[in-house]
Amino acid sequence: MLLDLSGKKALVTGIANNRSIAWGIARQLHLAGAELGVTYLPDEKGRFEAKVRELTAPLNPGLFLPMDVQNPDQMQAVFQQLESQWGQLDILVHCLAFANKADLAGDFSATTAQGFRTALEISAYSLTSLCHLAKPLFSQGASVITLTYLGSERAVPNYNVMGLAKAALEASVRYLAAELGPEKQVRVNAISAGPIRTLASSAVGGILEMIHHVEEKAPLRRTVTQQEVGNTAAFLASPLASGISGQVLYVDGGYCITGL
Ligand code: 0WD
């Protein structure tokens, strides 16, 4: 098989339900033979846990743990477990983001300091803290993958503070790639996905109009699927992408090249 991830250990964050991009990624990594560890965002009633556990059961995750990236103890616990169970990490998938709904519509200038901090901390800083924890465990040639969006470089209506978070995330990809490459050939890349209907994207005002716009204007005249993003993640995780680091790779049907 050209794309073979058998024996690779992959930690996948950000699965919320069967529409999540992280779910598309987890399935394609599994199909390529990787062993999965899954983290979920815990809530008080344990509903997320039950849902994600049931969804991911067919993929037999070797690790299944709660992790809120605003909770350093939970993050540390994940990596302790990972170290004792796996001893190393080959693939790290960062596929999560959050901003207050009020900051994802209306005037960008109305963003509060609190809203700014929340969006940047959860959506951008978390990649850095995850990489810091994972650094001693990364295997030779390990691959880190995060998810970003075109709103980092263009003023996309309503994306607002999340655009800033994604710009910071993309800059983090470059700094992390520069830090992690020399010693163990660890690669860090972002996939910039076109708009897909998910729990997170439904919080962005006017997402359906955005999707229709892409269907009309993108060179491929359609949006992309979670599976297409998952295939790209599997490629980036594999030795087929051994020369690629610090990049933002667009999986958007070509939309980003258009003049709108
Ligand atoms: O159109 C889209 N859907 C695009 C999404 C286009 C381009 C990029 N992306 C990005 C998102 O910005 C995000 O980085 O892809 C990533 C995954 O997003 P998704 O698949 O669209 O959304 P979703 O299925 O909701 O998964 C994101 C999850 C959260 O779900 P909710 O909606 O409940 O916030 O991120 C997780 C959570 O599971 N999450 C957290 N995980 C750990 N700690 C936290 C947190 N503090 N906050 C949210």
Image (cartoon, grey):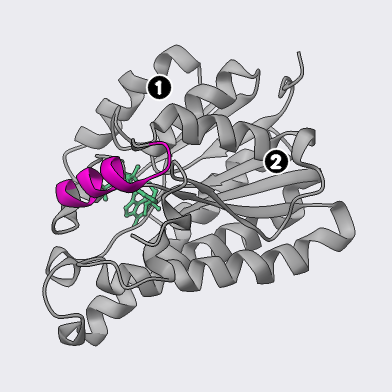
Q: Secondary structure at mark 2?
A: strand
Q: Secondary structure at mark 1?
A: helix
Residue 227 in picture, x, y percent from top left: 45, 27
Q: Earlier in the sequence, mark 1 or mark 2?
A: 1
Please tell me which residue lies in front, 253 or 15: 253
Q: Residue at x 42, y 68 (%)?
A: 152
Type of residue at label 2? Leu
How far apart are the alpha carbons under marks 1 and 2? 20 Å
Residue 161 in view here: yes
Instruction: Look at the picture and state if 190 lies above or below 63.
Output: below
Q: Determine which of the numbered discs, if any, sits on residue 109 in the image.
A: none
Please tell me which residue lies in front, 258 or 171: 258
Instruction: Tell me the crowding category of disc 1: few under 14, some 14 to 19, or many 20 or more residues within 10 angstroms, Cα based.
Output: some
Instruction: Tell me the crowding category of disc 2: few under 14, some 14 to 19, or many 20 or more residues within 10 angstroms, Cα based.
Output: many
Magenta region:
208-220
Residue 117 in picture, x, y percent from top left: 33, 78
Q: Which residue is mark 2?
A: 89
